[in-house]
Amino acid sequence: MASDETTTPLGRWLARGDDEQDLWGRLVPGPSVDDVARRLSAVPRSFLEPGLSLRSLVGDVLDDLAPDPLGQLAGPARRAADVAGEIDESGHDAARRGAAVALWTWASQDELGPAEPRLLTRSADRVLAALAWRLAPVVDPRVWLADAERRDEAARSLLFWGGQLPAGEDAATARALLEARDSLRRDQSLSQALAEQQHRLEVMRRLREARAREAAARPGHE
């Protein structure tokens, strides 16, 4: 991908190299899509203010993650703050709104009561990137709040990229429902770039597996 393409929302997303196929095999139980959608629809106006610092908001929302000895954000929160800072600097309004809605969904567990199971924050950076760079540029987050089907897509996207399976669904059902709603795949001008990245990831996966088999077959391998 050309370097200037990485400054577009989709280019930023593809540059991360998140492996969708691999993630489908590693999901853990999460709350229901309806619960997450309800939280999305209740996002406060304060989270959508244009001048809001997403990086600062990450620190406020993810304060359940212990700071390091220097008083800085640790682990997942630090990675999420780095993504939030990139979104802040991009000046892309829809991306900012998408990330802010995701942050509210986590914050809502204190305001509206905890989800069951709780929404995980260990992959918060990936969730912020997915909602900001992958979904928001195709469907503005304001539409998520007004349209039930797009809100369902946003809820499913948040759960999936957070590594969680919607309650009451197996992986095959969840995948079929998310793919049926995937606005990026339905946008012909963008879906080709996504398909090319997925092909590259699949080739890389096969190469890793082949190297592992070769290493296991060498004499003296323990």
Image (cartoon, helix red, strand yellow):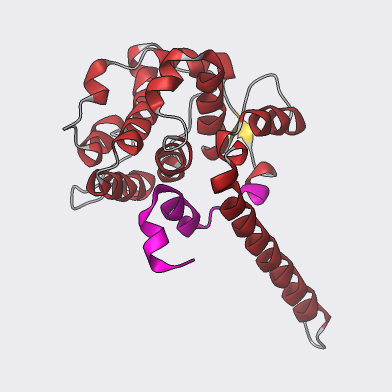
The answer, for residue 207, to whether it is visible in the render is yes
Residue 195 position (above or below residue 146): below
Tell whether position 5 is magenta.
yes
Residue 164 image-quadrant placement: top right
- Left/right of residue 141 with respect to residue 70 in the rendered view: right
Residue 113 or residue 98, whichever sits in front? 98
Question: Most prominent secondary structure in the magenta stretch?
Answer: helix
The answer, for residue 19, to whether it is visible in the render is no
Q: Picture coordinates of residue 12 (x, y %)?
A: 41, 54
Furthest-left residue in this view: 51
Q: Picture coordinates of residue 34 (x, y %)?
A: 56, 14
- Left/right of residue 150 with respect to residue 203 in the rendered view: left
Residue 198 or residue 166, whichever sits in front? 198
Residue 152 position (above or below residue 65): above
Pick the quarter of the image with the C terminus: bottom right
Furthest-front residue in this view: 189
Q: Picture coordinates of residue 57 (x, y %)?
A: 24, 34
Q: Residue at x 70, y 34 (%)?
A: 175
- Left/right of residue 77 with respect to residue 24 in the rendered view: left
Tell whether position 60 is magenta.
no
Residue 12 or residue 106, whichever sits in front? 12
Total number of numbered discs in the rendering: 0
Q: Which residues are magenta?
A: 1-22
Q: Residue at x 71, y 72 (%)?
A: 207
